[in-house]
Image: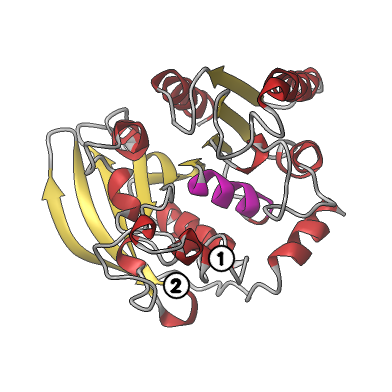
Amino acid sequence: MHEQTLNAWLGDMPPMDERAVTVEVVYVREYKAFTEKKLTYAGFDGETIPAYLLIPRGETFPLPGVVAFHQCGYHCDIGKEQVVGKRVDLPDQAYGFELATQGFVVLAPDAAKVGERYDPDLREQWQCAHDHASQDRCCCAHGGSWGQPRWRPVFDAQLAVRVLKGQPEVDPLRLGAIGHSLGADTILWALPFVKDLKVVALSGGGIMKAENEGWMPYALPYEDLLADVIAPHTALFEFAGIKDPIHRIDAPLPEDAAGHMKKKRTLYESLQSAGYAVDLHTEACGHYFHENGRKRAYDFLRHHL
C-alpha cells in the first residue's frame, strides 16, 4: 500500500526500456588514484545525460559500484562537478571523489535541469538560482527533481544504476548509492523501484524532515516508508545535522529539535531491533555532510558491499 501511495504521488512513470543503455565515452583522463571517464547516455525522450565514471587504479576487478547523486543547494550551475571533487569550495560534497580513492567505482550523473542539463529558459549556463529575483526559478523546481513530473528523478536513477551495473569493472551484485540533500531525496524516492541497490547512504535528505509539507505524500510519513518499503530490502545509513534548517530538524520551533531527534533515534533503534540493517549518525552541524558522517557512510557502504 505504501509503495502504491508513493507511485501515485510520483505520477505515471514511463516504462523503462529493457534494452541495454547505450553509453558513449566523451574522454578519458588518468589521475593518480583513479581513471576519470566522461560519459553520456540517453535519458527520457532522447535527452542526453552526462556523467563522470571514476574507476580506481591498482585494484582487482570487479569492484563494488556506487551512484553518487549530487545536491542542488541552488547550485544549478555545477551539478555533478561537486561530487567528483572539482569544487574546492564544497569539500563536504566530494563524496564521489573520496569513495573512488577508497576502491569504489563511482558514477556521478547530472540531475534534470542541473549542471550540463541546464535549461536556457531558466538561466544561463553559468548562473545559479540565487542569481534570479526569485528562488522559485530554481532549476529543480521547474521540471527537475522537485518539480513536475515528479517521476523524472526516479526514472533517471533507474538509468544511472543500469549504466553503472553495465560497466565491466563493476560487480553487478554489489551496487549502492550515496547522496546529500537533492541527492538523498532522489535515492529515497527511487529505492522502492530500483531493486539492484543493496545499500544506500543519505545526508540531509527527505526522511530527516520533521514534516512532509509537499515533499512526500502526507499519507506516507517517513516512518512507514522506512519500515515497510525501504528497510526490508536495502541497508540504509542516514546522516542528520542537528542544526539543519533546510529540512526542519529544528522545526517547527528550535526547542523541538531535541524531541524530533529522539523520535528519529527511537525509530532507528526499533528497526535495528527488528533486524533491519539501518544506522543513524548525527553531528551538531547544519545542512552539511560532516566529515564524521561521511566516514561513517563510507564504512557502512563498505560493510554491506
Quick check: 284 above or below 241?
above
Q: What kind of element bears circle 1?
A: helix
Q: Which residue is mark 1?
A: 155
- Dividing the picture into quadrants, the one containing residue 17 is bottom right
Residue 293: percent from the left, percent from the top? Answer: 47, 22
Looking at the rendered structure, the number of numbered marks drawn on it comes to 2
Residue sitting farthest toward the bottom = 45
Quick check: 302 above or below 196?
above
Q: Which residue is mark 2?
A: 43
Which contiguous range is marked in magenta?
182-192
Residues at circles 2 and 1 in contact by the CB criterion of under 8 Å? yes
Callout 1 crowding tier (Cα within 10 Å): few <14, some 14–19, many ≥20 = many
- Dividing the picture into quadrants, the one containing residue 119 is bottom left
Residue 85: percent from the left, percent from the top? Answer: 25, 39
Quick check: 260 left or right of 169?
right
In the rendered structure, find residue 34 and report the number of the disc placed on it.
none
Residue sitting farthest toward the front = 133
Quick check: 140 above or below 57?
below
Q: Residue at x 29, y 32 (%)?
A: 91
